[in-house]
Image: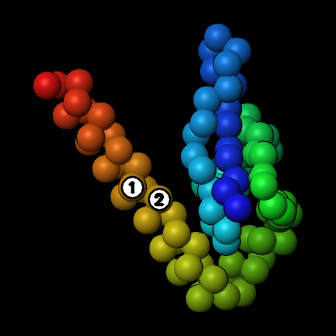
């Protein structure tokens, strides 16, 4: 059951930003930035759960373990995206 997050491109087309699997999160960085809107939609083959930012932040404050799990998930995603940037850079430099 993959979940797809997409964002409207400049020309109006939708582009896939990320494919989200079960148990994964997306757009959490904006929660820490205080953003109230995020120009992304999600389509699911299963269930998507939306969390209230204030409640989730309170849960993070109350649980160090939850904080570390979220940071680990975000770090893994960051490393994967950096790998993609590196691969695309090498492809265009060749």
Looking at the image, which residue is at 39% across and 55% down?
80
Q: Quadrant of the N terminus?
A: bottom right
On screen, residue 15 above or below 20:
above
Instruction: Please tell me how many numbered marks the rendered image carries.
Output: 2
Q: Is residue 69 toward the left or the right of residue 53 in the image? A: left
Asked whether residue 42 is in view, the answer is: yes
The tag on residue 30 is: none
Q: Nearer the viewer, residue 45 or 77?
A: 45
Estimate the x, y position of residue 29 in percent, counting from the top left.
61, 55
Q: Quadrant of residue 49?
A: bottom right
Looking at the image, which residue is at 76% across and 45% down?
42
Q: Nearer the viewer, residue 34 or 89?
A: 89
Estimate the x, y position of residue 11 in percent, counting from the top left.
64, 11
Instruction: Name the residue beneath numbered marker 1.
Output: 80
Estimate the x, y position of residue 82 in percent, counting from the top left.
34, 49
Instruction: Name the residue beneath numbered marker 2.
Output: 77
Estimate the spatial distance between the alpha carbons at disc 2 and disc 1, rounded to whole Å: 5 Å
Q: Is residue 17 toward the left or the right of residue 51 in the image? A: left
Q: Is residue 64 toward the left or the right of residue 92 in the image? A: right
Asked whether residue 25 is in view, the answer is: no
Labels 2 and 1 touching (C-beta < 8 A): yes
Helix, strand or loop under label 1: helix
Q: Quadrant of residue 79?
A: bottom left
Crowd tier of the residue under label 2, counting other residues whose Cα lies within 10 Å: few below 14, some 14–19, many 20 or above: some
On screen, residue 85 above or below 59:
above
Helix, strand or loop under label 2: helix
- State the scheme by which the image is colored: rainbow
Looking at the image, which residue is at 72% across and 38% down?
40
Looking at the image, which residue is at 14% across and 25% down?
94
Estimate the x, y position of residue 17 in percent, counting from the top left.
58, 40
Crowd tier of the residue under label 1, counting other residues whose Cα lies within 10 Å: few below 14, some 14–19, many 20 or above: few
On screen, residue 3 above or below 64:
above
């Amino acid at each position: 059951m993959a979940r797809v997050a997409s964002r409207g491109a400049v020309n109006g087309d939708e582009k896939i930003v990320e494919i989200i699997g079960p148990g994964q999160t997306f757009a959490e960085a904006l929660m820490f930035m205080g953003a109230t809107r995020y120009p992304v939609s999600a389509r699911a083959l299963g269930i998507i759960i939306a969390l209230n930012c204030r409640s989730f932040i309170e849960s993070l404050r109350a649980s160090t373990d939850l904080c570390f799990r979220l940071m680990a998930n975000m770090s893994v995603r960051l490393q994967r995206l950096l790998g993609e940037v590196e691969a695309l850079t090498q492809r265009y430099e060749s």
